[in-house]
Image (cartoon, grey):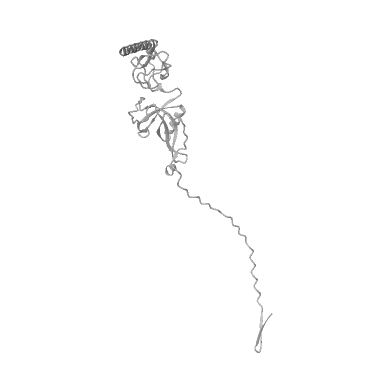
Amino acid sequence: MKNTRAIVMLVIAVLLGLVAVGVAVQWLGDKQGAGHKVAVAARDMQPGTELTADAVTTIDWPAGESPAGTFSNPAQLNSRVLKTVVARGEPLLENKLAPVGTRGGLSSVIDPGKRAITVRVNEVVGVAGFALPGNYVDILVNTQDEQQKPVSKIVLEKILVLAVAQESTRDETKPKVVDAVTLEVTPEEAESLDLARSIGTLSLALRNQMDQEPIQTAGARRRDLLDPNGSVEKAPATKVVVKRVVVRSRPVAAAPKPLSPSEKIEIIKGLNRSEVEF
């Protein structure tokens, strides 16, 4: 009896398992049949890449779950230009593409209303090769103030790096020391940057991409380097007090007039002697 009961339970478990498998297969078939094709990147591509037939492929995507702006026909993407980095297998969306008719290259990734300007840098100024396309930098100028004293000041903040040297591709594993950096700026920022590089030396400060907080600084001067904490006490200024002294003159007494000479007569009487003046 015990063996018969165990065999019955085993048969029931197997039957239930088969039913579950059948239901799952039917559900997957329904989902696959209700899906549609979505165009995706056939390889990793950089901004400015013009899409061709071999750069696009299609995959099955569940219906109702595809992102907005997808394409089902690869022919719709012919000659379109990427404005962002796209990885292999990533859906090609409308917001990742430059407007229809845009030619490939750096100009296709510049946002409307912005301009691209190139500045010369060196190994130190270029953040030792770590200012890569897609990074944000602050721009400093070292010049002289109105008193002809050295000053270093941040003139532009959160400026997008479009390209380094002649390359707009980004490879964070291979920093590259270059002699020029192309930046995306507004027309007003382009004017400020052109003036800054004509009056002083430019430097780049690499910035966190998530840092949106603007900053206000007064600039750094020589006294800030020599006494950053203001610990050196300055000698108090000498105060000179000038008192007005009034000297009042006193009348000088007139000198006594000399006496007019007089005549004297000496009278001798015995042992007595006397003088008479007249």
Q: Quadrant of residue 270?
A: bottom right
Numbered-mark total = 0
Residue extending farthest front: 1
Lateral position of residue 169 relative to residue 242, left or right: left
| Residue at image location 44% in from the left, 34% down from the top | 154
Comparing 182 with 52, the one in front is 52
Q: Position of residue 14 (x, y in %)?
A: 33, 12
Comparing 222 with 255, the one in front is 222
Q: Position of residue 263 (x, y in %)?
A: 66, 80
Comparing 132 with 272, the one in front is 132
Residue extending farthest bottom: 270
Q: Position of residue 171 (x, y in %)?
A: 34, 26
User: Compared to 37, does 180 lie above or below?
Assistant: below
Residue extending farthest left: 3
Q: Quadrant of residue 41?
A: top left
Q: Quadrant of residue 132?
A: top left
Q: Position of residue 196 (x, y in %)?
A: 43, 33
Comparing 30 with 85, the one in front is 30
The image quadrant where one finds the C terminus is bottom right
Lateral position of residue 249 relative to residue 45, left or right: right
The image quadrant where one finds the N terminus is top left
